[in-house]
């Protein structure tokens, strides 16, 4: 299906969202403000986005009949996570408009393709080698040195599917830890900060980036995002330029988040990307004229993009597991903006909500 010079998908239409987590939930809320209906497709009962959707399909991602009925019921399909089976995306794309395209998803699903893509557009990453077996891992460790990190090519997130190697003797244990899945070995980056850039691009070719955010991870899970990032204007410009370049090179139709390291030598190195709204962009809900979820909807529906201007500085903190039980004390600060995802089971480490605090923006306080 040709998607480049397509008309806008007008308010009142139905947006199909694959995935029913908090990103889908916040997308559906933003879509509703613009007059859209959302139809959420997710295998799990009680998914956070189901509660705010106009229609839901609860079925596995490879259920052909359910996918066909979903495609027939919506005007455009997008997704709130990237691990959708290729055959399902193909099936949907043959029946309706899917944005972003399979090419973008495919690149984001595989760490090796992703790294090759960024090298190809002149955006450096950590040094890396593909690894398909223990002998290759041993060679890669010798080439890259220790410490290094073994990461599965696919299906890794929040530190899952990763094993840190501090000594060459740990190769076999690391290989066992990722269960011998196709992987890459990455050299360890000595970094001072982690940052992320979020960019939207619409089919009509408008591109717009949000200000660069600074992220602190705890146990591999995002803990806090602060804006503005404490980086130089040149580093902020470089990070935004990488995001812009990536969006154009991928012919992106939607939203793309890119996580990056600010290396100790000052260089910006790309870590990974996600072609969807991102946890490190939640601050935009309370601190920008247009937030990442609305921008995502606008891009996917080929509307004009909104201003990403940041009217406030902000700090966003994730609320994991049982920490949401403190909702009352969080609300004792009347300026705290509490966002809860409606998840009933507060498992340890599970993202249950977030809280954003905004602060006045001073003149010249950077991007
Ligand atoms: P990832 O799943 O690739 O986003 O990695 C999760 C976190 O692990 C990152 O946010 C970093 O804090 C850390 N990390 C990942 N890769 C590297 C690397 N090559 N060097 C240093 N730290 C890393």
Image: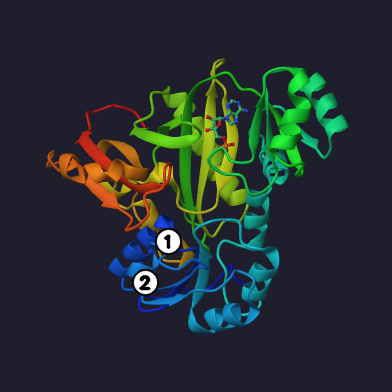
Residue 81 drawn at (x, y percent): 53, 56
Residue 36 drawn at (x, y percent): 36, 73
Question: Label 2 belongs to which residue?
Answer: 53
- Tell which of 71 and 141 is nearer to you: 141
Vertical side of 353 occupied by 314: above or below:
above
Q: Earlier in the sequence, mark 2 or mark 1?
A: 1
- Per the model, the C-alpha gap separating discs 2 and 1 is 9 Å
Residue drawn where x is 54% and y is 73% of the image: 6
Assign ligand 1 to one image quadrant.
top right
Give the left or right position of residue 247, taking residue 209 as reference.
right
- Tell which of 194 and 294 is nearer to you: 194
Residue 217 drawn at (x, y percent): 45, 31
Give the left or right position of residue 293, taking residue 88 as reference.
left
Q: Quadrant of residue 159?
A: top right
- Mark 1 neighbour class, 10 Å CA radius: few under 14, some 14 to 19, many 20 or more: many
Residue drawn where x is 13% and y is 38% of the image: 333
**Quadrant that contains the N terminus:** bottom right
Question: Which of the numbered marks, if any, corresponds to residue 24?
Answer: 1
- Total residue callouts: 2
Mark 2 and mark 1 in contact? Answer it, CB < 8 Å: yes
Residue drawn where x is 37% and y is 54% of the image: 345
């Amino acid at each position: 299906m040709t998607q480049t010079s397509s008309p806008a998908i007008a308010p009142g239409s139905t947006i199909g969202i694959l995935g029913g987590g908090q990103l889908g939930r916040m997308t559906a809320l933003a879509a509703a403000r613009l007059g859209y209906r959302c139809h959420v497709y997710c295998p799990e009962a009680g998914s956070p986005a189901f509660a705010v959707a106009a229609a839901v399909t609860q079925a596995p991602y490879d259920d052909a009949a359910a996918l066909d009925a979903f495609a027939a019921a919506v005007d455009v399909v997008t997704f709130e996570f990237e691990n959708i089976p290729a055959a399902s995306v193909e099936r949907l794309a043959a029946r309706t408009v899917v944005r972003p395209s399979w090419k973008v998803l495919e690149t984001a699903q595989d760490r090796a393709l992703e790294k090759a893509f960024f090298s190809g557009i002149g955006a450096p990453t950590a040094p890396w080698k593909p690894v398909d077996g223990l002998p290759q891992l041993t060679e890669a460790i010798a080439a890259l040195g220790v410490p290094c990190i073994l990461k599965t090519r696919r299906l890794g997130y929040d530190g899952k599917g990763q094993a840190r190697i501090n000594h060459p003797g740990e190769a076999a244990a690391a290989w066992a830890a990722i269960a011998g899945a196709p992987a890459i070995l990455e050299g360890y980056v000595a970094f001072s900060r982690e940052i992320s850039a979020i960019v939207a691009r619409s089919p009509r070719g408008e591109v717009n980036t949000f200000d660069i955010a600074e992220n602190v991870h705890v146990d591999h899970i995002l803990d806090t995002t602060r804006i503005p990032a404490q980086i130089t204007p040149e580093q902020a410009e470089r990070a935004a330029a990488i995001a812009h370049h990536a969006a154009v090179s991928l012919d992106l139709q939607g939203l793309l988040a890119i996580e990056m390291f600010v290396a100790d030598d000052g260089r910006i190195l790309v870590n990974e990307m996600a072609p969807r709204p991102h946890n490190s962009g939640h601050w935009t809900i309370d601190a920008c004229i247009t937030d990442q979820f609305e921008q995502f909807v606008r891009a996917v529906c080929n509307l004009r993009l909104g201003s990403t201007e940041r009217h406030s500085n902000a700090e966003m903190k994730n609320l994991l597991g049982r920490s949401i039980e403190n909702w009352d004390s969080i609300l004792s600060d009347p300026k705290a903006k509490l966002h809860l995802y409606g998840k009933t089971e507060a498992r340890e480490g599970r993202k249950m909500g977030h809280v954003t605090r905004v602060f006045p923006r001073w003149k010249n306080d950077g991007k």
